[in-house]
Image (spheres, rainbow, N blue to C red):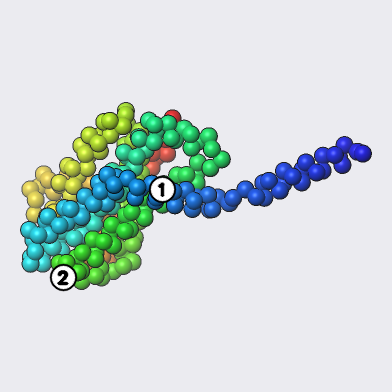
């Protein structure tokens, strides 16, 4: 029997094994489902990533109940805060935790493509963001008597842009955090001041000039402006393209160190 004849069955077996390998989309979907299951099995993470903005909404909503003007500031502000908590806060902490516990290193050594794992992680964060914004919108409608968002297209565009921006910022920050024990301090040292000056709980245009100038540099301020345009009806996407560009610019600038600095161990 010739050498080619002996090699042919082995080649056919190899092709059969390759053909049975799951597609990239299938393994990404499976990893995404796993991320969702692990998220809801961790009550602490679910609270700080999903429940904390709702807690602020309940507290400040009770204070401003009946004041429509303040509620129209609060609802988009809490929605913007939700985008930040479910992407920036969650990824900055989780990436450090996964890296320090060696999980990223083990994931790198599995047949799961790195791009599929990162895509599933990003899709998981985006899902949390969308759920949070919808819950805040529903609370504004059914609890505080505000109408549904007036421009769903603008809402979707700004939610997507905000998720991209703060996800990139969260991963970039994770490269600077030395260990998982210090992660909450690093994240809160940025999160709390940004929320405080970005007009989440008040109209930042009425703040002192110094605070207002700082707020205009931060992406959360422009994200809240865009969400306000969509939810309250203060203009459409065409009137707030400048705010969208600022959010996207922050995302692009953060994506460079986030990608270049990413390490599996």
Whichever of labels 1 and 2 marks the residue nearer the N terminus, that label is 1
Residue 80 at x, y percent in the picture: 24, 54
- Please tell me which residue lies in front, 220 or 126: 126
Name the outermost residue toward the top: 178
User: Which of pointers 1 and 2 indicates the residue nearer the eye?
Assistant: 1
The quarter of the picture where the C terminus appears is top left
Q: In the image shown, does 223 or 55 lie closer to the viewer?
A: 55
* Residue drawn at (27%, 51%) of the image: 50
- Secondary structure beneath dot 2 equals loop
Q: Which residue is mark 2?
A: 145
| Any part of residue 245 in sight | no
- Residue 14 vertical placement versus 141 (above, below): above
Q: Secondary structure at mark 1?
A: helix
Give me the disc on residue 35. Answer: 1
Label at residue 249: none
**The one of 219 and 139 positioned closer to us in this rendering:** 139
Give residue 33's position: percent from left, percent from top.
44, 52
Identify which residue is drawn at 36% across, 55% down: 127
- Disc 1 from disc 2: Cα separation: 35 Å
- Residue at the spot 80% in from the left edge and 44% down from the top edge: 9
In the visual, does 37 lie left or right of 60? right
**Residue shown at 24% from the left, 70% from the top:** 148
Residue 64 x %, y %: 8, 61
Q: Taking the image as drawn, is residue 115 in sight?
A: yes
Nearer-the-camera pick, 214 or 149: 149
Is residue 66 shown above or below 89? below
Determine which quarter of the picture holds residue 144. bottom left
Q: Estimate the x, y position of residue 222 in percent, counting from the top left.
A: 24, 53
């Amino acid at each position: 029997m010739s050498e080619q004849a002996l090699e042919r069955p082995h080649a056919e077996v190899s092709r059969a094994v390759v053909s049975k390998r799951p597609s990239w989309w299938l393994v990404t979907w499976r990893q995404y489902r796993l991320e969702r299951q692990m998220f809801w099995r961790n009550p602490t993470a679910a609270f700080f990533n999903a429940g904390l903005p709702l807690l602020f909404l309940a507290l400040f909503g009770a204070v401003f109940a009946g004041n429509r003007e303040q509620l129209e500031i609060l609802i988009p502000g809490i929605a913007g805060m939700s985008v930040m908590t479910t992407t920036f806060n969650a990824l900055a902490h989780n990436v450090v935790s996964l890296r320090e516990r060696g999980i990223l290193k083990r994931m790198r050594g599995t047949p799961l493509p790195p791009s599929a794992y990162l895509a599933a992680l990003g899709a998981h964060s985006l899902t949390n963001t969308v759920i949070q914004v919808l819950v805040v919108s529903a609370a504004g409608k059914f609890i505080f008597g505000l109408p549904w968002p007036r421009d769903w297209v603008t809402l979707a565009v700004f939610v997507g842009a905000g998720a991209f921006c703060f996800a990139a910022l969260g991963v970039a920050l994770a490269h600077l955090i030395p260990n998982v024990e210090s992660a909450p301090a690093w994240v809160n040292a940025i999160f709390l001041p940004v929320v405080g000056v970005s007009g989440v709980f008040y109209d930042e245009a009425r703040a002192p000039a110094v605070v207002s100038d700082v707020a205009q540099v931060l992406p959360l301020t422009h994200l809240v402006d865009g969400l306000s345009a969509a939810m309250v009806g203060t203009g459409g996407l065409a009137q707030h393209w400048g705010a969208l560009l600022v959010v996207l610019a922050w995302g692009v600038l953060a994506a460079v160190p986030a990608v270049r600095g990413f390490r599996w161990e």
